[in-house]
Image (tube, rainbow, N blue to C red):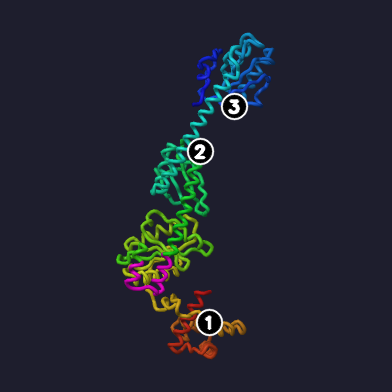
Amino acid sequence: MSITLSDLLAARGLELTRHGTSALSDDPIQWVAVTELEDPAPFLGGGEVVLTTGLRHRSTAAQRRFVESVKRAGALGIGFGTGLSHDTVPVPLLAEADRLGVPVFEVPYSTPFMALGKLVADSLSADHLAQLHQLLSAHQVLAEALLSGKGLPRLLAELSHLVKADVALFQYGAPVFATSEPDASWRRIPVPTGLRDRCTLAIAEPSVQPDIVAYAQSLIGVELSNQAARRASSRAVTGQLVGDVVNGLLTGQEAAARLQAAGIDAVRRLSVLLVEVASGQIRTLPALPLPTEFSGFPSAIHDKRLALMVSAAEAGGLASRLSAYLFDAGLTAKVGIGGSYTEPAGLRWSFYEAREALRNGAPVNEPERLNLTSLLMASRDVPLTDLAAEALDPLAAFDSKHGAHLIPTLDAYLLLNGSVAAVAADLGLHRNTVRYRLAQIAELTGYDPTVTADRVHLYLALNVRRLGS
């Protein structure tokens, strides 16, 4: 254990005698410094006991300067060795020490300074070994807690016990675990994970064992990185399964069995929540941790979106909570809600509805009734992009060369239900000009906007072109 000045004075065999009236400090002695310098302050670090024989402190002024220098350096006391330069502790030195509050004790000629130094050194060594043993024991406790199968909650609970203070862990601004509600006074410590997740460990003050916190940081960082890798892998596998169901490659009982094995109970009424983020943030989705209320719901990555299969009754509230979490995490995101269905076919419909809802562009988007146009454009088996290019590229080229505005005219004509008069009024044109442009469209594309079948083809082409732009 650390030794104090009182312990040193009471040590058997040293025969030390206290002088003066200055109070003894309870701080542990950091070292024993032996010096005959008149001004030892530049060579002291604070917390020492300064031993001297007063060889160069013959005058009253020199003795006072010596005491002032020791005080300035933050030493705990002066041990004055008698029997060499001085037979007794000099009165001026004692008077100045009492005035400045520096304890003084006499070291008799029979007691070598080395004996005091060895006693303090042995104490410091024992204290250091005890601290190392305590630190290694704490390391073992934290490692065993993490490997116990109870993960981060157990580790953080043990950390709280070791530092004798409440702790909390945050990731993307959301609490992962907390032993109590943190406030602004808690110390915040960043935890490196290799992810842009703003992971922070918060510890209430006062706390003890600061050295153990660094080890806890490393364990937490490794565990969170491992969790992220497991999430990414799981979502990729589940995403492949969900993709097969959504694309109609897996149906019926086989689909239900494989979904059940992946934790998706298609017998229950489920809704799909679909998360879409800005293009520069897509790489965040596979490993993105979710708030604790989502821990029981399967998640998947499909078509660069994060899909969650949630309880239909909770879908609206969960979507709002998810949107708020994504915003706090710094992600530019929107959430689409799919309808409530059972069976694999229902999961497919809910996914389509959630994807269609995302087109509304709000942070949270409610499901709407699907239409045939949306389903056609969602299908990967229909070459709509090629069909759209075949129909509209001639018009785009003609508009570019002649400034004819055929595509805007066609768009207005389809939007206004084929009314020449309404198009003329909307575009500020003569009706004959509108009819002439429609004739040009028919001639250039081979599709007549006045014929129903051709009109549907052109309508789909315009929508596909708009989505791809």
Residue 117, relative to residue 446: is it above or below? above
Residue 13, relative to residue 424: is it above or below? above
The circle drawn on residue 90 is none
Label 3, label 2: how far apart the Cα atoms are: 22 Å
Q: Residue at position x 45%, y 47% from top? A: 169
Name the residue beneath numbered marker 2: 211
Please state the horizontal and vertical placement of residue 351, each as a whole percent of the image: 39, 69
Residue lying farthest left? Answer: 267
* Tally of numbered discs: 3
Name the residue beneath numbered marker 3: 46
Please state the horizontal and vertical placement of residue 361, each as a whole percent of the image: 46, 67
* Residue 428 seen anywhere in this rendered image of the structure: no
Of residues 19 and 449, the one nearer the viewer is: 19
Mark 3 vs mark 2, foreground winner is 2
Tag 1: amino acid: Ala
Of residues 409 and 444, the one nearer the viewer is: 444
Tag 2: amino acid: Asp
Question: Which stretch is magenta?
Answer: 238-258
Helix or strand or loop: what does disc 3 sit on?
Answer: loop
Of residues 131 and 456, the one nearer the viewer is: 131
Label 1 Cα crowd, 10 Å radius (few <14 / some 14-19 / many 20+): some
Looking at marks 3 and 2 on the same chain, the residue that comes earlier in the sequence is marked by 3
Helix or strand or loop: what does disc 1 sit on?
Answer: helix
* Residue 173 seen anywhere in this rendered image of the structure: yes
Q: Report whether 314 appears left or right of 9.
A: left
Name the residue beneath numbered marker 1: 389
Looking at marks 2 and 1 on the same chain, the residue that comes earlier in the sequence is marked by 2
Label 2 Cα crowd, 10 Å radius (few <14 / some 14-19 / many 20+): few
Please state the horizontal and vertical placement of residue 413, each as a whole percent of the image: 48, 83
Label 1, label 3: how far apart the Cα atoms are: 82 Å
